[in-house]
Image: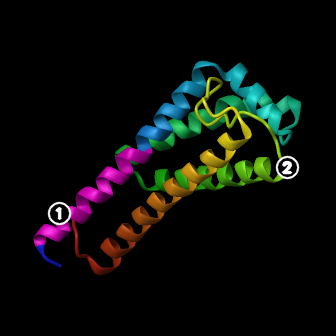
Amino acid sequence: MNHQSGMIFRWSYRFMRWSLSVVFLYSGILKLMDPKSFAVVIEAYGLIPEAFLMPVAVILPVLEFIAAVGLIWDIRWSLETITGLLILFIMILGYGIYMGLDVDCGCFGPDDPEQTFSGLQMALYRDIIMMAGVIFLYAFRFQNEHKKLLPI
């Protein structure tokens, strides 16, 4: 691999990290600004007992925020946390679509523009695309760690 292609891959890695970070920072901040409304969105899915709604409505966006900051600085646990959150979100969105729920996605807080059933599908597609970005980050790390080709 020549130096120029190495630079392209390194900057692609950074761009993907930073892009995912921005999405999760934005999402986490919006939800933290109004956790009561976010708890209402969570309740609409019917998956969390009422006693846990507020703790989840606070802990989930805090996790998003912390993982996003960690991903900006490429702290190892942050990518794993983002991966776990995306898997969780994909499962919940899939459940909502399967059950035919007409609920707000809740992805970007209580004023999320995706407030129709088709919005759940678009949110699912968006999360799958973000998961493809996560897979790219893991592949880059794997190549870099095992072949020692590219400095991050």
Q: Percent position (x, y) of residue 2?
A: 13, 76
Q: Which quadrant of the figure has residue 109?
A: top right
Amino acid type, label 1: Met
The residue indicated by pointer 2 is 99
Q: Is residue 118 visible?
A: yes
Q: Tell me if mark 2 has few (under 14), some (14-19) or many (20+) residues whose alpha carbon lies within 10 angstroms of its own.
A: few
Residue 137 image-quadrant placement: bottom left
- Label the magenta part by its dominant secondary structure: helix
Q: Residue at x 24, y 61 (%)?
A: 10
In percent of the image, x 26 and y 76: which residue is there? 148
Q: Quadrant of the C terminus?
A: bottom left
Q: Nearer the viewer, mark 2 or mark 1?
A: 2
Residue 104: x and y, percent? 71, 33
The single residue placed furthest to the left in the displayed view is: 3
Residue at the spot of label 1? 7
Q: Which residues are magenta?
A: 3-20
